[in-house]
């Protein structure tokens, strides 16, 4: 299972009020500090609400960062979160 699949599995279990889109943006950083652009190190997560429930954006960011703590320890370098 690759990093995108792991992240999707982790977040799907906890953020069931949102549709998830997970994008690997690592290629966009190729050449920065001799980075090869591989390894799923730069991830963008797009969350889209399924219903009209109220949520706190900061809380969602904190939850995601907490849930992905092991991914950061194993090579995830950058995480961009967009909430629609």
Image (cartoon, rainbow, N blue to C red):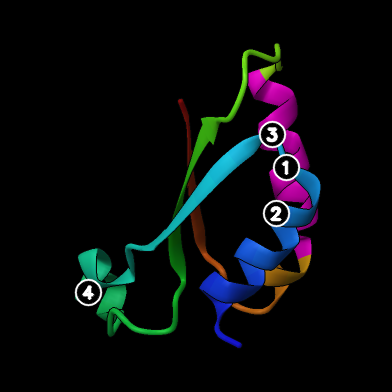
Circle 1 residue: 15
Q: Main secondary structure of the magenta part?
A: helix
Q: Which mark is residue 5?
A: none
SS label for mark 3: loop
One can see residue 68 in this view: no
Residue nearest the viewer, comparing 83 with 42 = 83
SS label for mark 1: loop
Residue extending farthest to the front is 51
Magenta residues? 57-69
SS label for mark 4: loop
The residue at the point 46 percent across, 25 percent down is 84
- In x, y percent, where is residue 6? 65, 73
Circle 2 residue: 11
Q: Quadrant of residue 49?
A: top right
**Marks 1 and 2, how far apart in space?**
6 Å
The quadrant of the image that shows the N terminus is bottom right
The residue at the point 43 percent across, 83 percent down is 39
Circle 4 residue: 30
> Seen in the image, is 30 located left or right of residue 84?
left
Magenta stretch holds residue 27: no
Q: Are marks 1 and 2 in contact (CB under 8 Å)?
A: yes
Circle 3 residue: 17
- In x, y percent, where is residue 44? 43, 52
Q: Are marks 1 and 3 in contact (CB under 8 Å)?
A: yes
The residue at the point 68 percent across, 23 percent down is 58
- In x, y percent, where is residue 3? 56, 76
SS label for mark 2: helix
Q: Residues within 10 Å of mark 3 (few under 14, many from 20)?
A: some
């Amino acid at each position: 299972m690759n990093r995108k699949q792991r992240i999707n599995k982790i977040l799907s279990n906890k953020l069931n009020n949102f549709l998830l889109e997970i994008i690997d943006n690592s290629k966009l950083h190729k050449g920065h500090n001799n980075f090869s652009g591989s390894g799923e190190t730069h991830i963008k997560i797009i969350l889209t609400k399924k219903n009209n429930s109220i949520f706190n954006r900061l809380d969602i960011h904190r939850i995601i960062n907490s849930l992905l703590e092991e991914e950061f320890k194993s090579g995830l370098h950058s995480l961009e979160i967009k909430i629609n």
